Amino acid sequence: MIGRTVGKYRVIDRLGRGGMGTVYKAVDETLDREVAIKVLNPDLGDSDVLKRFRAEAVTLARLNHPGIATLYELHRDKDDLLMVMEFVRGETFHDLSERLGPLAAPQAAHLCMQVLDALAHANRAGVVHRDLKPANLMIGETGVVKVMDFGIARVLGTEHFTHGGYMMGTPAYMAPEQVMGRDVDARADLYATGVVFYRLLAAQLPFEADTAIAMVQKQIAEEPTPISTCRPDLPNWCTKVIDRALAKSPSDRFQSAEEIQCLSGIAPVKKKGAERIWT
């Protein structure tokens, strides 16, 4: 694929491969701009996967938010179906955490607040991401966070997609109801955001396991390791946010992204112009 010109797009590099597709960096030679192109993996070319790939494009197209990577078009090239998206230059939350280790509470909260803003927009549109994790969250060069890869997102009220009978998502960040294969709503995304927040603060996960099955069992039956165990220096509001975000029952969690922002003692404030953090 590298070196090919597909339509008006010249492919110059491979960025990575996920469960559904391989992502390449390309140049739109008409507009002279960099783009990311996701190509459906050839071993997943059956009709159900193609249907899901198109559903991802439809999902992205209905979302218009600065914190969500923009979909430009869906392009057919012979037997390949290509999704052309905004190219985001920056660093994932995963790489940031690996590079810096535990973050200060205001820094981690500022990043997660941006995620919550994007999720609030998606959830209002009836879209649940369902695979929120540090690898799908990108910090751009200007500091703006972009939520990436709605590849397994489901528009509420439409067909529930699965693949090969397996749960869809990443067990370490999946809410208990999701790992049990039940229907999920926006509260599953908020659970995942809570795990991301924990990861940024502690540079480790609230549940540790050697296998996906063991992780699923812990998500269902065990309580997370208290954040104070590894970060006793954190303010009390961090514990309050994490404990509620990671509640086993959806009814015990935050019910919306806005509710987290309005939690008593954790109000967003303005600093240095447009920067927002929790206090």
Image (cartoon, grey):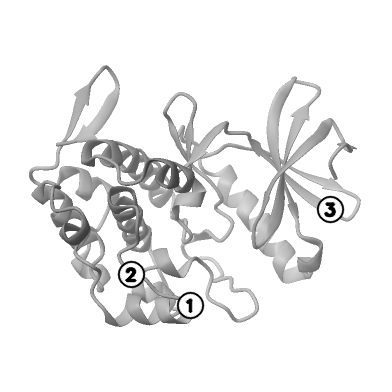
Where is 274 relative to 152, above or below? above
Give the alpha-carbon distance from disc 1 to disc 2, as whole Å.
11 Å
Could you tell me residue 245's position as x and y percent? 24, 60
Under mark 2, the amino acid is Phe
Q: Quadrant of the N terminus?
A: top right
Give the alpha-carbon distance from disc 3 to disc 1, as whole Å.
34 Å
Sequence-wise, which precedes: disc 3 or disc 2? 3
Residues at marks 3 and 1 touching, judged by CB atoms closer than 8 Å: no
Under mark 3, the amino acid is Asp
The label shown at residue 80 is 3
Relative side of 25 to 139, left or right: right
In the image, 47 versus 199, the foreground residue is 199
Q: Secondary structure at mark 3?
A: strand
In the image, 187 versus 223, the foreground residue is 223
Specify few, some or many for label 3: CA neighbours under 10 Å numbering under 14, 14-19, or 20 or more: few
Relative side of 52 to 98, left or right: right
Which residue has dot 2 on it?
A: 207
Could you tell me residue 277's position as x and y percent? 23, 33
Find residue 15 and report its image quarter. Answer: top right
Could you tell me residue 40's position as x and y percent? 75, 56
Q: In front of the other: label 3 or label 1?
A: 1
Which residue has dot 1 on it?
A: 211
